[in-house]
Image (spheres, grey):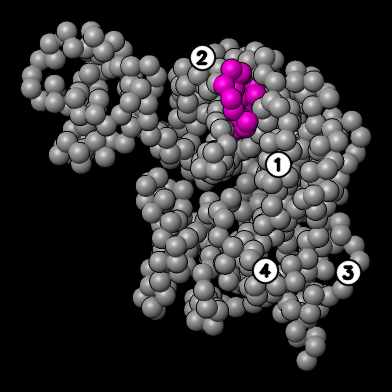
Amino acid sequence: MQAEIISEVLAGRDVLAVLPTGGGKSVCFQVPAMMRPGICLVVSPLIALMNDQVRNLRDRGIPALAVYSGMTYREIDIALDNAIYGDYKFLYVSPERLRSDLFMARLARMNVCQLVVDEAHCISQWGYDFRPDYLQIAAIRTVVGLAVPVVALTATATPQVAADIMEKLSFRQPNLLTGDFARPNLSYVFRETEDKVGRLLRVCRGVPGSGIVYVSRRKNAEDLAAILQQHGVSADGYHAGLGREERARIQEAWKRGETRVIVSTNAFGMGIDKPDVRFVCHYDLPDTIEGYFQEAGRAGRDGQPAYAVLLWNRSDVLRLRQTVRASFPPLDYIRDIYQKVYTYLGYAYEEGKGASVKFELEAFAKHFRLHARTAWYAVKYLETAGYWTLTEMLQIPARIQFAVSRDELYRIQLGNEDTDRFVKLLLRMYTGLFTEYVPVDVEKIARAGRYAPDVVGEKLRQLSRRQLLKYIPAINAPMLCLNYERLDDRNLRLPKGEYAERLKRRTDRLEALVSLVEDDGTCRCLQMYRYFGQEGGRPCGRCDVCLKNAQ
């Protein structure tokens, strides 16, 4: 479908492209953007994915940059100036940036040739990962001009979600292009079992090559990887709580084939280009068909035989149903959490609009003696209501910039020989320190100067206190982006009818997944294709149901 989608975009038409995982969605907007003058604006909700795509484009000699939460005002200012005046082809932005006056003012001066909405299901109230900030995209269209084509992309969308996406993005006329969801090389195998470890070991021993095992919790990732190692399977655990360098090391070892199996939460796999994954195993039951289909589709992208294995039991179904009920705390509790968050962050009424601050849920819950998971669900509900956006875990390195000129620095008496040596070390290792904030690796500086990492941090703080250096410590936490000033309870809008409707939609998606795993009489592929609105078709002949029916 890539050629057809690209042709529609080059003809200036809005298009919603639904291509399954591995369908090559990025090419569908990158190719037409390269064929036109101007810059391509890409809205993406995943900061890690944005950074990966920017890095991949730069590696190919294509100038690209990104703007997201956690950057300083000056860093954003410089990036947007580059987007206006520099020779850049792609500007990636997170959806929460769309609300800022700074961004909207600069956007009006950009020569935008294309507006891309990645993970477009996030724009729909019926999508499985609704992000209210996406609703700002329609306003962007009036700034860049309605003649600029919109390319909306997603791997999964039911007919209802697809129609909602096109309406919310103000498509000039409906234009839905859906790729073939059939994967002739991929076999779906569902197993109801109480002995999941035993079943997983059979998969690892019976299917040669690389694999991904998905679990629901971070601790499970590490524990299950250790169990696999004990049984002679080369495995490693991966989750968002690991440090940036550790995650990169684990990921690269797996991509090179040095580690055979990655055991991960769903933080792993998005945007990773490894075509020879021979199996994906869901050790824990996922909570939506959309999420399952995306994750399972990371197997066999090279077209060779591969397996998508799902292990489940009745306890999993009970646990998921309980989780759905727990994920909708009472409205009075949600209102109380709203006020506690602003109090915790230090904002009075009518303050906080536009702020982006680090927000560590466990510290927040501990401060108010709350049950962390219930508080998290309340925070997420308030996000879907549009009051704030909680970003993914950010891994942003420390940044420094000298606050004095090079000449002034040489005239200043730094005080002692060690401080002088430290400053010279920074100047040797990094360029541009007098003109802009430069990302620095504290551990690398420590190794080069034979310091302990905490000593490097203290030296940077000392230079900052002396106003010789501007120092922004590394960020390793989610960011909470506040869309409005703090409201009192009378103005906090959380309607009961909307609450009930969201709970119903969430419950319906879960029950669709339960029906998929429990129905052992209908081809797995046909069930999923019908869920996504692709009627007709034949049984795949490869899934566990088809093989059982053929006996």
Q: For the residues marked 4 and 3, what is the alpha-carbon distance in whole angstroms?
A: 20 Å
Which comes before the other along the chain, label 2 or label 1? 1
Q: Residue 354 versus residue 174: which sits nearer the camera?
A: 174
Q: For the residues marked 2 and 4, what is the alpha-carbon distance in whole angstroms?
A: 57 Å
Which residue does the image show at 71% across and 55% down from the upper left? 23
In the drawing, what numbered circle is on residue 537? Answer: 3
Q: Is residue 287 above or below residue 398?
A: below
Which residue does the image show at 42% across and 48% down from the upper left? 241
Q: Is residue 504 above or below residue 463?
A: below
Q: Residue 526 versus residue 518: which sits nearer the camera?
A: 526
> Which residue is the site of mark 4?
303
> Which residue is the site of mark 1?
31
Check if mark 4's residue and mark 3's residue have beta carbons within 8 Å.
no
**Residue 98 within the magenta-colored segment of the rendering:** yes
Q: Secondary structure at mark 4?
A: loop
Q: Which residues are magenta?
A: 83-99
